[in-house]
Image: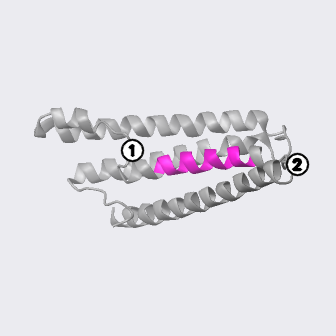
Amino acid sequence: MAALTRFNARLARACMYACVAGLLVIVVIVACQVFGRYVMNDSPTWTENLALVLILYVTLIGAAVGVRDSGHIGMESLLALVPEGPRGYLEMVIHVLVAIFGAAMAYNGWILGAEVVSYKLPNIGLSEAVRYAPLVVSGALIVLFCIEHVIALARGEEVVPAWH
């Protein structure tokens, strides 16, 4: 369990650094678009599509890290209403359901991406599949992070967020 926790903590931290870098790139892209539109009166055509693709990566990968660090919108209010005894069981059920959701995200993202891999995004020339890749990555991360939570709950432990 300790090896999985260390691996997941490092992975979650790397994902968050990548998300922060992605946000910075989005800010630069939008600034280029605003400068081009209002100063040069000639907006670059690639900026909007690239920013939209990056937003998908930042939000979905960030959401997966939120699952690992329990920073997501969970069932905390429901758990607070449950007596101490069944609370751990209910928390485990919640993590299993979230893992099933993550697996469905990864699987369906893979299927959708495979269907559109030959199509190109306008103005940036990338495959349309790049829009579905973050679903696959995020879904796989969610499954991995939920496995860690279930193992920790079974052992009576708690997953320490990557930032501590």
Q: Which residue is mark 2?
A: 42
Residues marked 1 and 2 touching at CB (< 8 Å): no
On screen, 51 above or below 113? Answer: below
SS category of the residue bearing label 1: loop
Considering every residue shown, the one lying at the far front of the view is: 39
Where does the magenta region start and end? 50-64
Which residue is pictured at 46% across the width and 66% down the height?
10
Q: Residues within 10 Å of mark 2 (few under 14, many from 20)?
A: few
Q: Closer to the camera: disc 1 or disc 2?
A: 2
99 horizontally vs 91: left or right: right
Magenta stretch secondary structure, dominant:
helix
Nearer-N-terminus badge (1/2)? 2
Residue sitting at x 31%, y 51%: 151
User: Residue 53's x, y, as percent?
Assistant: 69, 45
Q: List the residue tagged with mark 1.
A: 72
Q: Please, is residue 55 above or below residue 163 in the view?
A: above
Residue at left 79%, top 40%?
A: 117
Q: Is residue 56 rendered magenta in the image?
A: yes
